[in-house]
Amino acid sequence: GQQVMQIPQYQHVQEGEDFTTYCNSSTTLSNIQWYKQRPGGHPVFLIQLVKSGEVKKQKRLTFQFGEAKKNSSLHITATQTTDVGTYFCAGPGDSNYQLIWGAGTKLIIKP
Amino acid sequence: SQTIHQWPATLVQPVGSPLSLECTVEGTSNPNLYWYRQAAGRGLQLLFYSVGIGQISSEVPQNLSASRPQDRQFILSSKKLLLSDSGFYLCAWSVLRGGADTQYFGPGTRLTVL
C-alpha cells in the first residue's frame, strides 16, 4: 500500500543549529502537508505544497516539494527552543478523505 | 471560525471497563471527522473516519467502535478496554477543498488503561 517514509526519527541539535526532516512517498502526491506537534499537544497544520519543485518559507522554516512530487523536506534555520516538537508530513491517501502520515521527526534541543 | 472540542482531557480506566470519548465541531457543516490514536512517542494511527452522519469507515480491526449521531459529533467507544488501548486519542476534522484535505485536530484525550 501507499507509504510515506520520514527520516530521521529524532534529531538532537544545539540551539542555533539547523534542522532538516525528509519525507519520501512510494507514489506521486497531489500535495504534501506539514504539521507540528508540540510536546503534550496536538498536531497543528503548518503548510501545504502543491506544485512540483515548490519552495515556501515561513520565517526560519523552508519547505520544499520535489520535482517528481514524491519527496519533500522541511528545513529550520537557527533553531530556537520554540521549535521543539515533532514534525509530521502527510500526503493524500487513496481516497480524498484520508491522509497518509509520516512517522514524524522529533526535534530535540540539547541542553 | 471553526472550533473542535474533545473531552475528557485525561482519563484513567481499568481493564475491561467501557469507554466513551466525544468530539464536537463548531463553525462548519458536513465536516469529515477522524479518530486517531497516538502511542507515547509514536506517530498517528488512523482508527476511524466519517464523511457523513451514520457513515463510518474503520481502518484498524480492534475492540473500538465509532459513531456519528449528528453532523458535528463523533464518538469513540469500547465495551471492554484492553491495556493496549492506552494512548493519546485525537479527533480531527477536515473539509475537502480543491483536492486538499487539511486536517484540524482537537486537544486530545490522554487515556491510561490500568
Image (tube, helix red, strand yellow):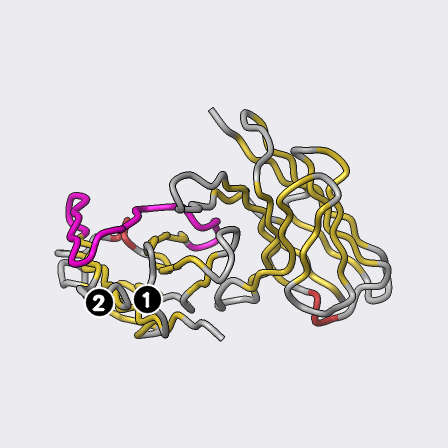
Residue at horizontal 31%, vertical 74%? A7
Q: Chain of mark 1?
A: A
Residue at horizontal 75%, vertical 47%? B67
Q: Residues within 10 Å of mark 1 (few under 14, many from 20)?
A: some
Residue at horizontal 44%, vertical 63%? A101
Count of marks, rendered view: 2
To the question of a shared chain for discs 1 and 2, the answer is yes
Whether residue A111 is visible here, answered yes or no, is no
Q: Earlier in the sequence, mark 1 or mark 2?
A: 1
- B103 relative position to B61: left or right: left
- B49 relative position to A30: left or right: right
Residue A28 is marked as 1
Residue A65 is marked as none
The span shown in magenta is A39-61
Choose between B33 and B111: the one closer to the eye: B33
Element marked by disc 1: loop
Is label 1 in contact with label 2 (beta carbons under 8 Å)? yes
**In the image, residue B98 lies in the stretch drawn in magenta:** no
The image position of residue B33, as x and y in percent, is: 60, 44
Q: Chain of mark 2?
A: A
Could you tell me the amino acid type at mark 1? Thr
Element marked by disc 2: loop
Q: Quadrant of the C terminus of chain A?
A: bottom left
Give the labeled residue for mark 2: A68
Residue at horizontal 56%, vertical 62%? B38
The image position of residue B72, as x and y in percent, is: 65, 33
